[in-house]
């Protein structure tokens, strides 16, 4: 046997013994991910549904006065009026969040166990007797690994059929995360094994990142060695389970390689795609500055059932973004109290984009009525139509701007677009010609992942037999 092929066989054998179980875990959890997606969360729709309607009759403090009470270091980056603990309140965000009650101007100082239980009871519309306090969380547990900004938080168990658990942030005095027994179980067969989101490992971010990079990188070498053997070995020499390993390797080996390699690149080794680009001033130029809360003195709004009001500055003018019973928020002029139903003009958006990136010319702009290969509904549904603006900078930066709200919704550099194809293209096969046809895409992904899982399980059996044979041989000698 030639030396090169012998080394390839040995490396493939021992890498397979070490990693075949990981491949099975990744492929099986990948099938679950197609249907379950990510970790448990509180969706914006559920949050909006559970928010109580604002009592404007109880609002006695104007937004500008609330900002003075909050003693912010500068103008708030974000200002919202909503209901907190059955009282209207302003949430002002500037290097942290401060809540000022709109009925008397008091600043919310502390959210303890009593307040957390009250917030949870209102959110679930249940008596407090149905709730059990589980303690204060200052370090992430299994379910707050992606929501560390909500900490410190109070954890509350709900006595309901879904076995709900709530996490109430001490900073925002809101429910920030909701899990149920079903969503936790799905996470254990989907996102947690697929992303290796095991809490003891994931809490140590740098270690977790290196483990994922090195295991997936070694897995890519294993898959490549298998493909080399598929084209250099003769299938007639294989019998029994080895023949099935060869057949499944020929059928699913290329997918296994591209899938595990793209999984490694999702961690962005050497951070190759996250730097560069231009246009950092475009979001501010579209807004025209931070919201001037003194211009929001009239809180009489032409809408019913309002649950949340955000104070915005758009193209230099004050607007309310009103969230209520309807799914789409309304944009209301703070000066005229009129609902703005038309989008901002393409000319005004381009002028402000150019102003925010003054040293770089615009190469091309298009108003898209449908998603393209980069701006697409991977998670949720980004707004349409959208203005795509391409700049002639060395990194070929693209901006996607929502004409209705005059705000940037996505930004891509050339390397980020390449990363999109290497990762999402190879990993999720989300090519436009079939990704938007959900059933076809799901059937294809389940079939490929099933084939990869079968290939890997056969590898586990072969590896186990090899290990046991080696142990028996050692006993003989």
Image: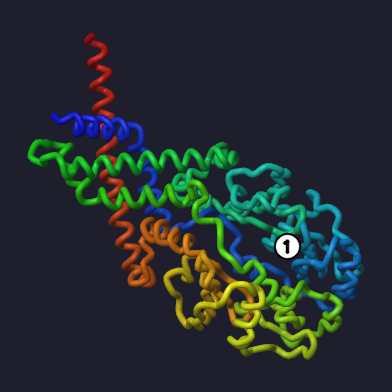
Viewer-nearest residue: 165 or 259: 259
Classify residue 22 by image quadrant: top left
Viewer-nearest residue: 130 or 53: 53
Q: Secondary structure at mark 1?
A: helix
Query: x and y percent of residue 108 in the render?
Result: 85, 58
Q: Is residue 179 visible?
A: yes
Q: What residue is disc 1 on? A: 122
Identify the residue at horizontal 60%, vertical 47% (top origin): 145
Q: Is residue 441 above or below residue 138?
A: below
Residue neighbourhood size for the residue with mark 1, other residues' Cα within 10 Å, grouped as few (<14), some (14–19), many (≥20): some
Q: Is residue 120 left or right of residue 246?
A: right
Q: Is residue 59 left or right of residue 35?
A: right
The image's colouring method is rainbow
Query: x and y percent of residue 256 in the render?
Result: 31, 49
Identify the residue at horizontal 76%, vertical 75% (top origin): 311
Q: Is residue 367 above or below residue 416?
A: below
Q: Is residue 82 visible?
A: no
């Amino acid at each position: 046997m030639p030396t090169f092929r012998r080394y390839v066989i040995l490396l493939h054998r021992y890498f397979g013994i070490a990693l075949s179980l990981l491949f099975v875990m990744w492929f099986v959890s990948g099938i679950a991910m197609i249907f379950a997606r990510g970790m448990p969360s509180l969706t914006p729709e559920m949050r909006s549904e559970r928010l109580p309607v604002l009592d404007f009759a109880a609002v006695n403090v104007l937004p500008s006065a609330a900002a003075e009470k909050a003693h912010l270091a500068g103008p708030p980056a974000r200002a919202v009026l909503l209901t907190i603990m059955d009282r209207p309140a302003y949430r002002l965000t500037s290097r942290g969040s401060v809540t000022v009650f709109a009925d008397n101007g008091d600043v919310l100082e502390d959210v303890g166990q009593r307040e957390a239980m009250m917030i949870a009871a209102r959110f679930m519309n249940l008596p407090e007797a149905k709730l059990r306090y589980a303690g204060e969380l200052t370090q992430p547990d299994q379910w707050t690994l992606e929501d560390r900004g909500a900490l410190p938080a109070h954890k509350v168990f709900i006595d309901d059929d879904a076995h709900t658990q709530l996490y109430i942030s001490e900073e925002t005095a809101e429910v920030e995360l909701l899990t149920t027994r079903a969503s936790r179980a799905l996470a254990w067969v989907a996102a947690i094994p697929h992303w290796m989101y095991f809490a003891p490992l994931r809490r140590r971010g740098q270690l977790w990142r290196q483990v994922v990079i090195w295991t997936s990188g070694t897995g890519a070498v294993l898959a490549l060695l298998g493909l080399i053997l598929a084209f250099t070995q003769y299938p007639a020499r294989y019998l029994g389970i080895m023949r099935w390993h060869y057949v499944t390797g020929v059928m699913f080996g290329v997918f296994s390689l591209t899938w595990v390699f793209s999984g490694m690149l999702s961690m962005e080794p050497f951070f190759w795609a996250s730097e560069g680009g231009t246009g950092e001033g475009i979001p501010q130029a579209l807004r025209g500055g931070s919201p001037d809360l003194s211009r929001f003195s009239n809180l009489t709004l032409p809408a019913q059932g309002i649950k949340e009001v955000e104070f915005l500055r758009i193209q230099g003018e004050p607007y309310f973004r009103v969230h209520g019973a309807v799914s789409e928020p309304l944009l209301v002029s703070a000066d005229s109290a009129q609902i703005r139903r038309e989008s901002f003009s393409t000319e005004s958006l381009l002028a402000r984009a150019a102003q925010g990136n003054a040293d770089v010319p615009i190469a091309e702009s298009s108003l898209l009525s449908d998603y393209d290969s980069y701006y697409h509904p991977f998670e949720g549904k980004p707004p349409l139509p959208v203005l795509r603006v391409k700049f002639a900078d060395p990194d070929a930066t693209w901006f996607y701007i929502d004409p209705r709200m005059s705000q940037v919704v996505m930004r891509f550099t050339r390397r980020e677009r390449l990363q999109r194809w290497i990762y999402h293209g190879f990993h999720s096969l989300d090519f436009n010609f079939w990704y938007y046809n959900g059933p076809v895409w799901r059937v294809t992904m389940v079939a490929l992942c099933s084939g990869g899982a079968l290939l890997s399980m056969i590898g586990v059996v072969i590896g186990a037999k090899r290990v046991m044979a080696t142990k028996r041989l050692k006993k003989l000698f």
